[in-house]
Image (spheres, rainbow, N blue to C red):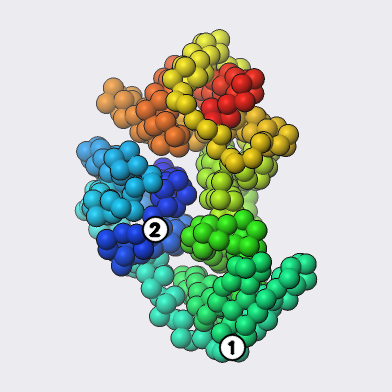
Amino acid sequence: MTMAALAVAELLLVILAYQVMASIECRQTEIEAACRALRSMTARGLAVLTVMALYFWLRPHAYRALTDRTADQPGHRMWLLGHLLGLALIFSPLPLFGAAEISRAFTPTLILLTTGGVLTAAGAVFWVTSASTWRNWMRNDSYLLPLALLIGFLVPDLADLMRPLWEWSTLSSLTFFLVFLVLTLSGFDVGVHPPTYEIGVEGFWVQIASQCSGVEGIALITIFMGFYATLMRLDLRQKRFWLILFPLAVLASWLFNILRIAILIVIGARVSPEHALNGFHSYAGWLMFTALALGIVLIAHRAQWLHRAPLPKHTTAPLREDSLAAKIVPFIVMMMSGVFVSAFWPEPDAGYPIRAALMALALLFFFPALCLVWRKPSLESVAVGLVIGVAWIITAPTQNLPITETPTVVWIATRLLGTILLVPIIEELFFRGYVLRRLHRDNVLWTVAAVAISSLLFGLMHDRLFAGTLAGVAFGLLYLRRSETSDAIAAHVIANATIAIVALLTAKWALI
């Protein structure tokens, strides 16, 4: 569970680093084919994690068997160092070449990313448990997990192979017409060229080719539903599943795609053509279709009419009271909201009110669980927070405001709310309350490793890696003093409040 949460966090960090902060333009690289293959790794990683989550959710006995084995036979600690080294190699091109020059230094970037990816994956796998334990567990489970992960990795390729099954001219024509209808009803003056399926608004034109008519989303839905039907084949009513739910899922995927194309055109016309094609178009579709596929699988799993046996009644505590979920889910919401606003705004900071709203909703949902873990913070946490806040301000480089227009009152209010309250709670729950706590052991080596890993991951989330990592170390040591997450939260709140007050008084919004 720890490694899975870390994998999700690390994947989201990679997405933010290389598709938001330093987007690689493949046409400017020396090896365009290799660049496009590398960019597909984001979709592959997302698909692998999704398939793995579905696998363990639908086969709880396999998950329990694995956790029992890993508890008795954990992997060697050196693999953790390998994982950490791989992670460092993945992010090393940013400080080495700079965010703006990565496309021109693509060959060394490709080597570093590939080597780092292999080390990160191998370190994670064999840190969980040894190769022999993995082999014995997979043999007892009929090697279904590696097959499932292979399917996840090949999902983009399988979608391409399935595309001819859905390439109907009627589908492209209908998609073209409905996108035109959605834009027209939304009040836009829409231009069209039916023979080539081109449609545009205010000078921004796109062509709705066969691959843009929804076939990718339909293929993705088909793969995930086929995976679910295979794992649940003994209990699932296959005819009802494929003849009723599957057509509805295909229709929903197609309608999602129409909405996606309409939004892309609006972004290209009103915001930025480059952002619409290289930002929103790059990953918004995969995120939307994956979320839809998971939602359909959830519906299928909860619908009694699709199952032969009665569904078990859940006797566990509600999700809102689950302290483990409260430490992980808000962080994932925070990271996903960053990807979301980066898809819709060329300057992601301009979409911060949306991020703040989503983070606040996540914390409000888990409020009962958060009340159970909150304790009165120590006075030391106040002192540590003040020191970190002052040090951050003094060492801050000269920067310009990260958004092009003067901030609105709404932006300033939500930015202050997020900086002072929401972000400290979410980050400390995850990095100290979850990551550090799960890695910590009662010896010096593991204590140092736990603080180092949690602090480095924390530092990677900030523009100033070194300063952010040092702040993470301070918060980590404060947490270890009493094993109370509330101490780290209070220190983080005080530090951010100090920085935010200075930013408010001086209008230096780059500080936050």
- Judging depth in this view, the residue of 343 and 10 nearest the camera is 343
Q: Secondary structure at mark 1?
A: helix
Give the side of residue 408 with respect to residue 150, left or right: right
Q: Is residue 212 above or below residue 41?
A: below
Residue under pointer 1: 195
Lower sequence index among marks 1 and 2: 2
> Residue at left 64%, top 40%?
405
Image position, residue 475 (x, y; %):
46, 22
> Residue at left 51%, top 59%?
274
Q: CA distance from mark 1 to mark 2?
A: 30 Å
> Residue at left 44%, top 75%?
159
Give the side of residue 383 with respect to residue 411, left or right: left
Image position, residue 366 (x, y; %):
64, 39
Quarter where residue 194 is shown: bottom right
The circle drawn on residue 25 is: 2
- Judging depth in this view, the residue of 366 and 463 nearest the camera is 463
Quadrant holding the C terminus: top right
Q: Secondary structure at mark 2?
A: loop
- Taking the image as drawn, is residue 206 in sight? yes
Quarter where residue 97 is shown: top left
Q: Amino acid at mark 2?
A: Glu
- Taking the image as drawn, is residue 237 in sight? no
Q: Residues within 10 Å of mark 1 (few under 14, many from 20)?
A: few
Q: Count how many numbered circles sit on residues in the image.
A: 2
Q: Residues within 10 Å of mark 2 (few under 14, many from 20)?
A: some
Image position, residue 448 (x, y; %):
31, 25
Q: Is residue 300 above or below residue 93?
A: below
Image position, residue 16 (x, y; %):
46, 47
Q: Amino acid at mark 1?
A: Pro
Q: Are marks 1 and 2 in contact (CB under 8 Å)?
A: no
- Judging depth in this view, the residue of 145 and 81 nearest the camera is 81
Give the side of residue 505 with respect to residue 23, left or right: right
